[in-house]
Amino acid sequence: MKDTKKDIRTLSKDQIREFFVGVGDKAFRGNQVYEWLWVKGCHKFEDMTNLSKETRTLLETHFVINHIAVDYMQKSNDGTIKNAVKLHDGLVVESVLIPVKDRTTACVSSQVGCSLDCSFCATSRLKRMRNLNPDEIYDQVVAIHRESELYFNRPLSNIVFMGMGEPLMNYKNVLASIEKITDKEGLGMSPKRITVSTSGVPKMIKKMADDGVKFNLAVSLHSAIQETRESIMPFAKSFTLVDLKEALEYWYEKTSKKITYEYVVWEGINDKQEDIDALVQFCKAVPCKVNIIEYNPIGDPKFKQADSKALDAYIEGLEKHRIPVTVRRSRGKDIDAACGQLANKQQ
């Protein structure tokens, strides 16, 4: 029989305080519970040790905590950790901890499956089952933060919404999770350490700008030629480069925040001089930097990593126009934890 009790984490602090007043208790009890839920990441009422047994039983009677569980953890040879995260309804997403010398980064998911259809990405081949709730996104971050402290003896330093799903297709819940992550009554992380990566949904990029978000924006671009982009990202027929460019200009005008373009170079797809020239022109629209990402195979022979000469040509072409560019080597490839590889293979 389905549990009809309300998930307490869907309530605000004020609502939890009101609950306690309504049952004849003190309002401050709600503050204590809220701290257990969001600062301490508590998943069981019985573990809220500064509450009386009667209070914990009361909470148990009225509410549930629909928390995640790390169902399966894999460690890469390079130190990367991938979590298969089981949700309260049995569905599974994946999240990744990426350690480097001076920081650890959490790569978190925002959807079960994905709303879009990028043909080079394993996640896009999964059916989108549902959006993640704010607490489910938050829990992924908490789990990785604890793993960072346990295995690398340092707290989590950065977060990227670059796991499973298109974050801007789950806009409301992604923003709510970031509010909790950055709140001093949550994890207290700086929004400057958070990046939301989108495949490019112009309308929602404008909405982010209007909402005055403080985090960073990355765009999965991969081609600045409309026909080429459509061939590898079919949804781009609806979200054109013209519209995307206009939205990014709007973003920069409103936020003054530089944009990061993520870009994979494939053999025979976008490795020609005309592709480089188109990218350079696109980059001139607003201040930006380009991350050239190593391709991570998903078993599709259509997509092959371009050779080093093609990458060098991109770097030379961008640097010639003073556009910052870096080449990002993939992490966790041996456990399918790299960009574009998250596909719940353990399921």
Image (cartoon, helix red, strand yellow):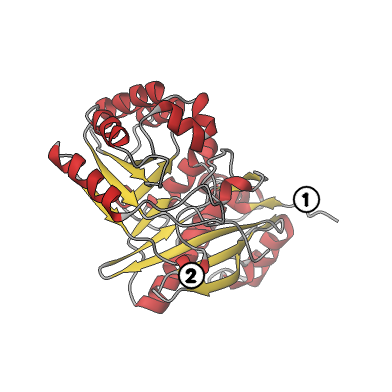
Spatial separation of the CA atoms under disc 1 and disc 2: 42 Å
Residue 334 numbered tag: 2
Number of marks present in the image shown: 2
Residue 81 appears left or right of 284: right
**Residue at the image position 70 percent from the left and 66 percent from the top:** 57
Q: Is residue 136 above or below residue 54?
A: above
**Residue at the image position 65 percent from the left and 71 percent from the top:** 53
Q: Position of residue 180 (x, y in %)?
A: 44, 50
Residue 266 appears left or right of 94: left
Q: Which residue is mark 1?
A: 4
Q: Residue furthest right?
A: 1
Q: Are marks 1 and 2 in contact (CB under 8 Å)?
A: no
Residue 314 appears left or right of 217: left
Q: Position of residue 153 (x, y in %)?
A: 34, 77
Q: Secondary structure at mark 1?
A: loop
- Residue 161 or residue 239, whichever sits in front: 239
Q: Is residue 17 above or below residue 85?
A: above
